[in-house]
Amino acid sequence: MNAYRLARGVRLQRKPDGASVLLVPEGIVELNASAASALALLDGTRDAPAIARILGESYEADPSELASDVRALLDDFAGRGFVTT
């Protein structure tokens, strides 16, 4: 199991207008609502399937349909150094 968390120096923040951003050492990454929801679940204890299950319950969607999107997001952000296992 690869449990994910935000990398050191990276923070998820909600702006006053309700939008979410990821504060990274190089700047700010604007997030859409689904990415923000997924990243909010990164606590170092959940793997990608667990995150997909929780999002599936929240959005009344099939977790198996969300799993590839969650994995792609985590892989992308891990490659950019924003999340780690």
Image (cartoon, rainbow, N blue to C red):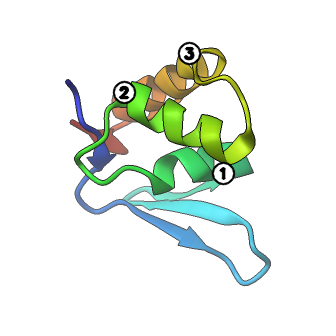
Q: Nearer the viewer, mark 1 or mark 2?
A: 1
Q: Nearer the viewer, mark 1 or mark 3?
A: 3
The amino acid on which the numbered mark 3 sits, given as a three-letter code, is Ser
Query: Which one is earlier in the sequence, the residue at label 1 or at label 2?
Result: 1
> Which residue matches tag 1?
31
The quadrant of the rendering that contains the C terminus is top left
Position of 71 with respect to 59 (left or right) is left
Query: Which one is earlier in the sequence, the residue at label 1 or at label 3?
Result: 1
Q: Could you tell me which secondary element the residue under label 1 belongs to?
A: strand
Tag count in the figure?
3
Mark 3–mark 2 distance (CA, rounded to whole Å): 16 Å
The amino acid on which the numbered mark 1 sits, given as a three-letter code, is Leu
Q: Could you tell me which secondary element the residue under label 2 belongs to?
A: helix
- Across and down, in percent, residue 43 comes to 30, 54
Position of 45 with respect to 49 (left or right) is left
> Which residue matches tag 2?
79
The amino acid on which the numbered mark 2 sits, given as a three-letter code, is Gly
Q: Which mark is residue 60?
A: none
